[in-house]
Amino acid sequence: MKLNKRWTAAVTTPLILLAACGDAEEEPAATAETEETGSDVAESLDYTITGIDPGTGIMDMAADAIDVYDLGEEWEVQSSSDAVMTAELQSALEDEEPIVVTGWQPHWKFIEHDVKFLEDPELVFGDENDVHTLVRDGLEEDLPGPYQLFDQFYWELDEQEEVMLMEEVEEMEPEEAARTWIDDNEDLVAEWTEGVEEGDGETVELSLVEWVDAVATTNVMAEVLRDLNYEPELTTVQISAMYAGMEGGNVDAMFASWLPAQQQYYDEYEEFFEDLGANSSGTRNGLVIPEYMDIDEIADLQAE
């Protein structure tokens, strides 16, 4: 298969206890705010965690969290996509409604909105991840320029999130956001391109999943390739196909291999690619909620 298409709190309810009046012994009136229970939160969320693409590592981890934290058999992880998940989160935030979503950093939502990770003491979602650049076997011989560029590519999470914000908040097209960021960060881009051989219009096949971090990273690399006189072709696929494309050379490179979160796919196709190492570090997976929800840990979702 030739991959050549371009894709671009619960709100706590105050409970007022009124003492009865009359000849009976008077009980003191009290006004108290009840604490949220797991059942309150679970019911308000209809026992649903809003997720992303089916088969992704974070979706498997979310399903495992239901079991590890004994949340109850009513809970389910609803698959969707990054775009749908983000839209659901924004809608809930606008109405100050409760919601639990699968989340990760880098992601623009942590800058734009007051959200937080639920604590995960059992480390179901693991420790911090590194995001690796993978290239197909033989790329160094076939396209030494792009190979060297990809090998020298590394940026910090806040640099990556700048591109995401331009895409998601300023509503720039991915190519425009990438170009704007490149023009504003010439020194860093010069480090990536130092000594890189320019091309003669050769096509470079890049695959990605439709996650804001992957879109930002891949489009930045695509624009740098264009500046070096290569012709990048971007194809958006499901996560498993992103790895499978390495088999048979349908894909030259990908920049969204989260490790260890995607270890199962990495191990399955490892013989078909070369790992150039991390292009960003300190990323994190987990369950994310609005700050106004009065819970702190995954276990607080437990249905009683």
Image (spheres, rainbow, N blue to C red):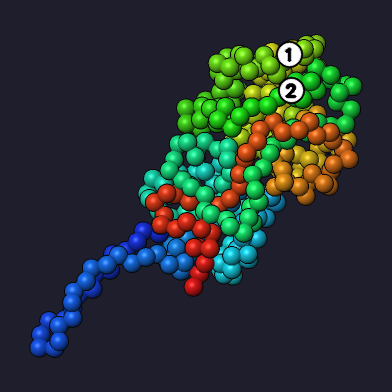
Q: CA distance from mark 2 to mark 1?
A: 8 Å
Q: Residue 167: tell me if it is visible.
A: no
Q: Residue furthest front?
A: 121
Q: How far across and how far down the image is residue 169, in percent?
A: 47, 31
Who is closer to the viewer here, 23 or 229? 23
Task: In the rendered structure, find residue 2 and report the number of the disc placed on it.
Answer: none
**Circle 2: residue type:** Gln
Image quadrant holding the N terminus, namely top right
Q: Give the answer, above or below, for where 180 lies relative to 122.
A: above
Q: Which residue is mark 1?
A: 194
At mark 1, the secondary structure is loop
Q: Residue furthest left?
A: 23
**How many residues crowd mark 2 within 10 Å: few (<14), some (14–19), many (20+)?**
some
Task: In the rendered structure, find residue 152 and report the number of the disc placed on it.
Answer: 2
Q: Give the answer, above or below, for where 219 lies relative to 52.
A: above
For the residues bearing labels 2 and 1, Cβ distance under 8 angstroms:
yes
Q: Quadrant of residue 132?
A: top right
Q: How far across and how far down the image is residue 62, in percent?
A: 62, 56
- The residue shown at (48%, 51%) is 289
Q: Give the answer, above or below, for where 115 lies relative to 12.
A: above
**How many residues crowd mark 1 within 10 Å: few (<14), some (14–19), many (20+)?**
few
Horizontal side of 248 relative to 37 (left or right) equals right
Q: How far across and how far down the image is residue 263, in percent?
A: 76, 47
- The residue shown at (58%, 17%) is 185
- The residue shown at (69%, 50%) is 57
Q: How far across and how far down the image is residue 59, in percent?
A: 64, 53
Horizontal side of 102 relative to 228 (left or right) equals left
Who is closer to the viewer here, 37 or 167? 37
**Circle 1: residue type:** Glu
